[in-house]
Image (cartoon, rainbow, N blue to C red):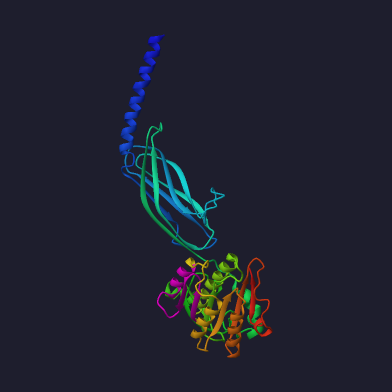
Amino acid sequence: MIWTTLLAMLWMGIVTLILRICAGIFEKKCLEEVSVSLGFSADEAREGESLMLYETVENRKKDILPLLALRFKTSRYLSFPDVEGVVSDYFYRKDLLSVKGYEKVVRKLTFRCKKRGVYTIEDVEITASDSFFFTKKRKKIAAGAGLTVYPKRVDLSRLNPEWKRQYGSFSSPLPLFEDPFSYIGIRDYMPGDDMKKIHWKSSAKSGHLQVKTSDYKGNENVLVLCHLESPGTFINSGAMEENIRITFSLVEFLRKNDVNCHLIVNGNESHRFHSMEPNFFPMVKRFLAQVEYDRVRQKAGEFMATADERIQGDECIYLISSVGKKEVTDYVGKWLKKGIPVTWIATIGSGEDDTAGCSGKIREHLVRWPC
């Protein structure tokens, strides 16, 4: 009995020693000839869209990787369906997989872009374990995956009743009311264009899609003012995000219709853009994807004074602001007296309407935008 026990213990010791030797060899070579990469299915997306994150692992040797763990840091605003209840801005995602010898494994992880922003995954930590969990080998690999999420489009047709009331069916300061009988030319197709406007004969000749453009009556110089200051003591993020969406949609619309546009945005930093500048819209998109508003650089009065210095008198103005202070209404009144067309889009988030005390004349040019 004693000899049997001793032999069993000796056998177990030998097996354990062999396993540990094998584990040592595994630890030394397990991550050799192994590459890992992360990549988004697109470089750009809109708020609310769904994309995929590709995890690619390639094992270029014959030895199997029985258990490989991938761990990387990402934003909670990239929402994966199998991850819930994340409170902090970032979380660490961990995925497990097994890779055979000379095998390439690609996993597709679907996620939704919950919020605008610029997101990066700097690196990924990989951990290889042997079948008996005797040893682990870790390695950090640069990932360099990047994604820019732009604000989502809003429905600008919500402004139609206001423009029709002020300017008539086909005389708005924006070509929202295009006359279908005033066809003047063609241009290249852009994402978001109505398929009904495609000029099929020109598209066939040119080899790429082209659309018809319509003439419209109104001013071709537009000044868009986006002021990201909350009306109350606390930051109304719902209203500020909607301000950014409206600004993005409006500038995109103007660009598609070849309208000369000047944009002034004021958040934590102030910036001016002009449609005559090279790369105008890419710069606007990038800025609006990142702009913050927790510490607004210019308060209402200073911002309106800055805008007033820019006005030449030959443009129409679109003011996007939730603030209804006297400093704002005074400048709006001043511009209207000069005969400058003004449309003030005041976003109302959480029922916080700061424009209730505006005068009758200004209310005629005010569009309350609940969000």
Give coordinates of residue 8: x percent, y percent: 39, 16
Q: Residue furthest front?
A: 233
Residue visible at 48% across and 80% down in the picture: 262
Q: Specify the quadrant of the image occupied by residue 273.
A: bottom left
Residue 208 in the image, given as x and y percentages of width and height: 44, 72
Residue located at (56% from left, 77% from top): 300
- Res 177 visible: no
Q: Residue 137 versus residue 189: which sits nearer the camera?
A: 137
Q: Position of residue 124 (x, y in %)?
A: 40, 49
Work out which residue is located at the far top of the displayed protein and give it: 1
Answer whether residue 13 is visible to the viewer in this image.
yes
The x, y position of residue 123, in whole percent, is: 39, 52
Q: Quadrant of the C terminus?
A: bottom right
> Which stretch did the figure color magenta?
260-288
Asked if residue 235 is among those painted magenta in the image, a careful observer would answer: no
Q: Is residue 75 above or below residue 171?
A: above
